[in-house]
Amino acid sequence: MNAMMAARTAQLHQWRVPLTAAPGAVSEARKQIRAAIWAWDVPVDTDVAVLLVSELVTNAITHTVSETVSLGIVAAERGLRVDVHDASSCLPVMLDAAADAETGRGLKLVASLSDEWGCYRTPAGKAVYFTLAFQPAR
């Protein structure tokens, strides 16, 4: 059976938020991603987006050498993209942590729940990102 779905209008939304590199940044990042998804009516799983942004911001504030990190949120034609920028030049490494380990499983979680993830160097350090494809209308 073939289902027909209305084409989604390609509309670009962008939001960039500076965050203090402290534990409160994770809570603020969760708040910002929820607000963006709600304001832009983005058809992604909010809980997954919140979990993944929590992982990336936690990693950034743990490993950065600066007082701030930056959260970038973009909704475009095919999905949602979240970039977390920090001042560390060290690229993340996915660890082979045990399932019951308290740390070291975050990037595996990001890899398994996102449609795409990666990292790249920036003039100020690096950014780690994930994407979530738009879910079909129900």
Image (cartoon, rainbow, N blue to C red):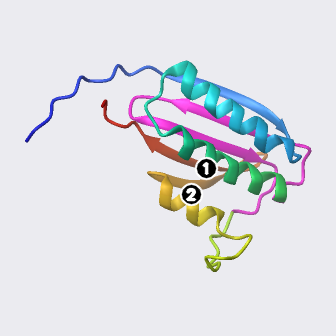
Residue 39 in the image: x percent, y percent? Answer: 57, 19
Q: Quadrant of the N terminus?
A: top left
Tell me which amino acid carries mark 1.
Leu
Q: Nearer the viewer, residue 138 or 70?
A: 138
On screen, residue 78 above or below 121: above
According to the picture, the residue beneath numbered tag 2 turns out to be: 110
Circle 2 — which element?
A: helix
Judge whether residue 86 is colored magenta. yes
Report x, y in % for residue 126.
71, 51
Judged left or right of residue 98, residue 86 is: right
State the SS at label 1: helix
Q: Earlier in the sequence, mark 2 or mark 1?
A: 1
x 50%, y 36%: residue: 80
For the residues marked 2 and 1, what is the alpha-carbon distance in whole angstroms?
Answer: 6 Å
In the rendered structure, the answer to whether residue 25 lies left or right of residue 46 reads right
In the image, farthest residue toward the left: 1
**Residue 71's image quarter?**
top right
Q: Is residue 118 magenta?
A: no
Front-most of residues 112 and 47: 47
Which of the 4 quarters of the picture holds residue 103? bottom right
Confirm or deny contact between disc 2 and disc 1 (CB under 8 A): yes
The image shows residue 109 at horizontal and vertical percentages of 57, 61
Q: Is residue 118 left or right of residue 17?
A: left
Residue positioned 61% across, 50% down in the render: 52
Query: Percent x, y for residue 73?
Result: 61, 33
Residue at the spot x=60%, y=26% of the render? 36
Q: Which residues are magenta?
A: 63-91
Q: Which mark is drawn over residue 52?
A: 1
Image quadrant holding the C terminus, namely top left
Asked if residue 117 is positioned above or below residue 123 in the image, the reply reads below
